[in-house]
Image: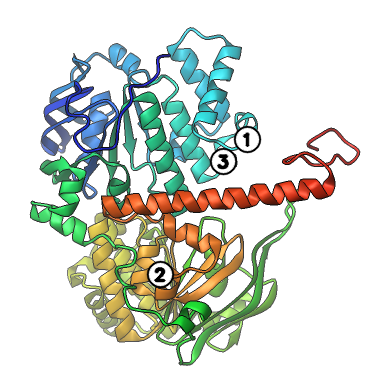
Amino acid sequence: MSAPAPITDEPGSFDGREPILQVRDLCVDFYVEGEWFPAAIDVTYDVRPGEVLAVVGESGSGKSQSSMSLLGLLPANGRATGSAKLDGNELIGMSSNRLRRVRGNDIAVIFQEPMTALNPVYSIGFQIVETLRNHFDLGPAAAKERALELLRLVEMPDPETRFHAYPHQLSGGQRQRAMIAQSLSCDPRLLIADEPTTALDVTVQAEILKLMRDLRNRIDSGIVLITHDMGVVADMADRIVVMRRGRIVESGDAKQIFANPQHPYTQELLAAVPHLGAHSTIEISEHERDHGGDTPLGQPVMVAENMVIEYPKRGRTPAFRAVDGVSLTINAGEVVGLVGESGSGKTTIGRAVVGLLPVTEGKLEIAGFDMVGATHKDLMPLRKQIGIVFQDPGSSLNPRLPIGESIGEPLMLHTGIKGSELDKRVESLLDQVELPRSMRNRYPHELSGGQRQRVGIARALSLEPKLLVADEPTSALDVSVQAHVLELFTDLQREHGFACLFISHDLAVVEMLSSRIAVMHHGKLVELGSAAQVVQSPKDPYTQRLIAAVPVPNPDEQKIRRERRDALLMQAAAEIEADEELEAQQLNVQPGERPTQGGPAGF
């Protein structure tokens, strides 16, 4: 395989190269109930070798459907017209047999959710080998060696072991790496990345974006990046296409669009993006920088002291300590943000607070009630004091109940009110979350994601709780919808004065809402301080890496942040290497090795 042509990251460095993909007047329509409805209208753009073109817009803007039409992956009721040429070969109208050879070989796709895109009954290695042997004349041994080479290329940890692992045995970031390895197996000319980092933690997202930047240089492919995350766009994109209601409303160089957007919709989109640091520009005192700020005065609503939560032993699986010695207090009217990666224990704490998980050791009091050792019957009176807003409002609402009944159900069960009085309370709650009263008779599937989340908030506030647990309430929403929901949430919190534990991995959102931020890592609380102190002057090395990994919607600033994060990672790696060398000297073995204890090396 020949070495890829050298490219640079400077704007305009792709203009002199012939496009890989030329899309002209592409239209996508869907036939529903006897009528054609447009999903994409007159879409036109080019993608050159080594270039990243970001296609951005809200859900329903047509960005995904226009890209899937290039591969003939539209549903049975969909059609595509216009022109899309890959290296001069027309894709629209191409026969199924020819398209089958194009898929994977010339155009590859990285899907949003690898767990549903990967086959759960086959190992990762088998699926990559299968792709290779379908497109190339390779024997099993050669295909396996190439698959391992691809896993190393995407920096999969311990590729020889992961080769035999099944998708459910890998973390989200590892599954995404496996899918990228499979996508790159045939050295495609064009890579379509459809929301490749949406479901990932911010640190894993930073690793995947770094990997994609490196791969762009290695294989010189064009990349179409489909996303609504403007921080990711600032980190990756050379050019941007902005779509709204199926049409391209603005396109151009990434730096130009971020610095001087022309279309009102692009301006609204960028204005709605939370910007880390924008809400912590105030000066922090030396005392606050050193001690993390004082706890605000007020009646404590939640008190945790040296709290331990364990998942019990099951069969051969040993007990797992998910939360280890956490101490945290939340006062009336205060919002405390709880952040950390997946597996850090933040959602486990949220579930324990609402009584869905028992506390193994330590202390947990909610509104003066001792949660340790409490039975289901004991918890019943406490249900009125705690509300919870779930991450996915679609699955947390009963699909068989109209939303009016879903909101009124807690009121009827806990207060016994019925009839016209219940109707008035439900209508008042709909008014508070800014939903029309007429929506009370609609079902969850008839509402948009933002509207369903408003219903979830209204239901959680129906009993006027003293403490609200919000578990990733905006992670599944478009950026503009997220902005409206967060504004509504802030207004309701001020009006009702409830305490809130806001759980999220989006630090920019947490900073916007919270007075204090608590950082979790491997079950331990590693840092707690005011939002300004944690964002501006983090003390713990993990918090420093977490803050540095957050992408911001500014290409120039993001480049500086990326370099700072790389420096922090290099420093951490050097410290680990130094510790290993010291340990090796003490044990009298080579660095990275372990002394054997009566068995083969490595066991």
Quarter residue 448 falls in: bottom left
Q: Helix or strand or loop: what does disc 3 sit on?
A: helix
Which mark, residue 168? 3
Verify CB contact (< 8 Å) between mark 2 and mark 3.
no
Rounded to the nearest whole Å, what is the CA distance between mark 1 and mark 2? 36 Å
Name the quadrant of the N terminus: top left
Residue to which mark 1 is pinned: 158
Name the quadrant of the C terminus: top right
Q: Helix or strand or loop: what does disc 1 sit on?
A: loop
Look at label 2 and name its amino acid: Gln
Q: In the image, what residue occupies the spot 18% across and 18% down? A: 93
Label 1 environment density (alpha carbons within 10 Å; few <14, some 14–19, many ≥20): few
Q: Tell me the mark number nearer the camera, choosing from 1 and 3.
A: 1
Residue 230 seen from this side: no
Q: Helix or strand or loop: what does disc 2 sit on?
A: helix
Residue to which mark 2 is pinned: 536
Q: Tell me the mark number nearer the camera, choosing from 1 and 2.
A: 2
Look at label 1 and name its amino acid: Asp
Could you say where residue 62 lies in the image, as x and y percent from the top left? 19, 41
Look at label 3 and name its amino acid: His
Could you say where residue 34 lies in the image, as x and y percent from the top left? 12, 35
Q: Is residue 63 above or below residue 383?
A: above
Rounded to the nearest whole Å, what is the CA distance between mark 2 and mark 3? 37 Å
Point out the tag, 1 or 2, that comes first from the N-terminus: 1
Could you say where residue 199 lies in the image, as x and y percent from the top left? 42, 49
Q: Is residue 348 above or below residue 580?
A: below
Could you say where residue 106 lies in the image, as x and y percent from the top left? 33, 19
Residue 162 seen from this side: yes
Point out the tag, 2 or 3, that comes first from the N-terminus: 3
